[in-house]
Amino acid sequence: MAVNVIVLGAGYASTGAITKLQSELSDNAQLTWIADVDYHLVLHESHRVIRDPSVQSDITFPVDGIADPSTRFIQDKVVGLNVEDQVVELAASDDVEYDYVLVALGSQTAYYGIPGLEEHSLTLKNLDDALEIHKAVKEASQAAARSEPAQVVIGGAGLSGIQTAGEIAEFRDQHHAPIEVHLVEALEEIFPGNDPACQQALRDRLEDAGVQIHTDDPITKATDKHIQFDKGAPLNHDILIWTGGITGRDTLADADLGKEHNRVNTGANFQTSDDCVFAIGDSAIIDQGDQPAPPTAQAAWQAAEVAGENIARAIENRPLRTWEHEDKGTVISVGEEAVAHKVKPAFGISLPVDTFTGVPAQMLKKLIAARWIADITSWNEARKSWSSL
């Protein structure tokens, strides 16, 4: 009887695991891929769609171009995981039984109980979100006047918030639109918890782009017209975008697994409290000793290959591999500019500085995305997407 292996989600972690499983599983295994969309989105480039919706065709890749003919694909929303009965529960299709399942459903936005924030903000979690932000920015700029520019406020100055602010500033400049862009961060500095040299380089790029930065004052309330701060005066907005945090998906709330805020706890081998359930990506809190693996695209790419191999090992009763996250550096877009920090040497080339900008950082950002696209499809597809990356 065939062993049923199911992968949930279409993000980096699940897509990378699918490609690995397709090469690792034996003929007596049936691989099923379940996601609520029929494409993979290169999420760390989704901010490009805010400026130019046509970019979406270069950063989305159909499932049938990634999955082997033998891999079964089901497009549906996962609504539950019954660990006791080993069943994935779907919104519109019959439940699907599994012998092993890899949970890689990603995350949802955390609002931290801030009154009004969820009701009055847009988010950037998927392609539809990026398109909605584009539409809102375009309409607000058309309705504004030079004397009263549209106020766009981005809450949360992590990677998504910084890149969103950069794209809206680029849209403003390209269209000569009456827009003011504000980036708000509760902590003392943007890109919290990272190297001061990187933080300063990002601040410089944002300020050069005309983004107004507000730090060290948390949002305490949001309305349809302004946000309130703990200390400072309220800040008016025509558009409020919230990128300030993540939590696990409600889908996993009732799953009988060890978890925190609906993110599943796993060992360094991606196995959960149930031996038949593995988890990676933003869905998981992966043990790495002192602190869990970061919920980043880079970590998901690295983890996917080992997770896929470990499911094949589990089927064959072989020892599972442990995984250790390797930070290979950071590259962040600010519109057409980019900042690179502590990037590991590649292709035998060592870099003379820790933090750099300009064309080298821009090209590196493109190469990273192109490499991922090539890994899941082909270098020809990566070449066709190059201009949009």
Image (cartoon, helix red, strand yellow):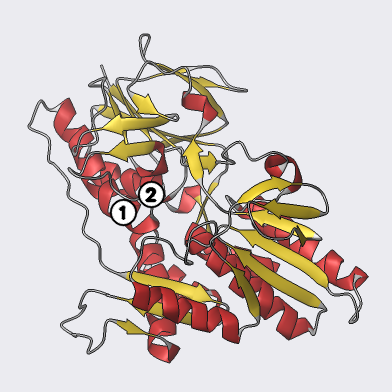
Residue 13 appears left or right of 79:
left
| Rendering coords of residue 313 (x, y %) | 14, 33
Dots 1, 2 in contact, CB < 8 A: yes
| Neighbourhood count class around disc 1 (C-alpha, 10 Å): few under 14, some 14–19, many 20 upward | many
Which quadrant is the N terminus positioned in? top left
Which residue is located at x 75 percent, y 58 percent? 234
Instruction: Report the residue that reaches farthest toward the left.
Output: 319
Q: In this view, does 278 lie above or below 280?
A: above
| Rendering coords of residue 282 (x, y %) | 41, 43
Give amino acid for label 1: Ala
In this view of the protein, can residue 367 be seen by the observer? no
| Rendering coords of residue 187 (x, y %) | 49, 58
Q: Quadrant of residue 115?
A: top right
Which of discs 1 and 2 lies nearer the camera? The answer is 2
Residue 151 appears left or right of 371:
right
Separation (CA) of disc 1 from disc 2: 7 Å
* Disc number for residue 31: none
Q: In this view, does 220 lie above or below 50?
A: above
Instruction: Report the residue that reaches farthest toward the top.
Output: 85
| Rendering coords of residue 53 (x, y %) | 69, 66
| Neighbourhood count class around disc 2 (C-alpha, 10 Å): few under 14, some 14–19, many 20 upward | some
The residue that mark 1 highlights is 299
What element does badge 1 sit on?
Answer: helix
The residue that mark 2 highlights is 295
Which residue is located at x 71 percent, y 77 percent? 171
